[in-house]
Amino acid sequence: MTKIIMHGCNGKMGRVIYNILKDDKEAQIVAGVDMVSCNTDFPVFTNIMDCDIEADAIIDFSTASAVDSVVEFAVEKGIPAVICTTGLTEETIEKINQASSKVAMFRSANMSLGINLLATILKKYSDVLYEAGFDVEIVERHHNQKIDAPSGTALLLGDAVNEGVGNKLKYVYDRSQVRVKRERNELGYSAVRGGTIVGDHEVIFAGKDEVVEFKHSAHSKEVFAVGAIKAAKFIKGKKTGLYDMQDVMAEI
């Protein structure tokens, strides 16, 4: 049984994870952390540093400003942490990297198995299309409450493409300020915000007289919750190191 501390337990993702784990025989939430209180069958703390419950892993779905305290708690208690919150600062990312030498840390821009499979495909085959003269663009769509753009997932996919072509591409986020033709080595990002779109991502390879598109659509937040739970089970018992969804997929 994997015992989990759910940081952000009363947020949207925290509740989705809680509902999934009701029927899971291999994992359970033993404690939660959230500023908002509600009825739960586990103790809830307003500050993670006050949590005194033994656990095998922490799942964090909160806000970027709260992640530093999760990392500090993980190191102090020796509990592996799955960081699912996005929009992190470079300072927080570095803190996670440093913490991984003391306790197992898991971070991925997207917890969906489908997105991470797509990233694997892009790393392997993008070079074929790019060397054949195809231009690369990424379009991402999210709900009207999302504040960062482009999304962390769009950047993850862009990095996969760039790695696949030998890091030859430069990222372009806004074409409105200049009036010039597209350069060969550009990777353009476009962000759409509206309604309740959970998350759509398209990687477009546009060549002469043909277009190849790789697309992933998330129809509910459950796909991210399932990935987070798999990550928590995976990281249980790991001593040190920095892990991501590629490591989880390697064991499936």
Image (cartoon, rainbow, N blue to C red):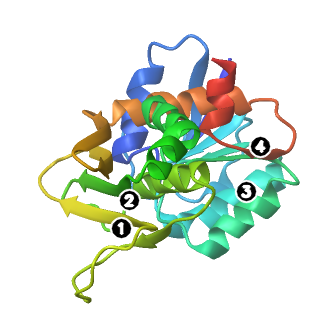
Name the N-terminal-most of marks 1 and 4. Answer: 4
Percent coordinates x, y for residue 96 in the rendering: 71, 60
- The reply, left or right, for residue 79 in relation to residue 86 is right
Q: Name the residue nearer the viewer: 160 or 73.
A: 160
- Disc 3 and disc 4 in contact, CB within 8 angstroms: yes
Q: Name the residue nearer the viewer: 198 or 12.
A: 198
What is the CA distance from the residue labelled 3 to the residue labelled 4?
A: 8 Å
The kind of residue tagged 2 is Ser
Task: Using the image, tell me which numbered label, if any, was put on residue 148.
Answer: 1
Label 1, secondary structure: give it.
loop
- Disc 3 and disc 2 in contact, CB within 8 angstroms: no
Above or below — where is 81 with respect to 85?
above
Q: Residue at x 29, y 51 (%)?
A: 206
What is the CA distance from the residue labelled 1 to the residue labelled 4?
A: 29 Å
What is the CA distance from the residue labelled 2 to the residue labelled 4?
A: 28 Å
Disc 3 designates what residue? 73
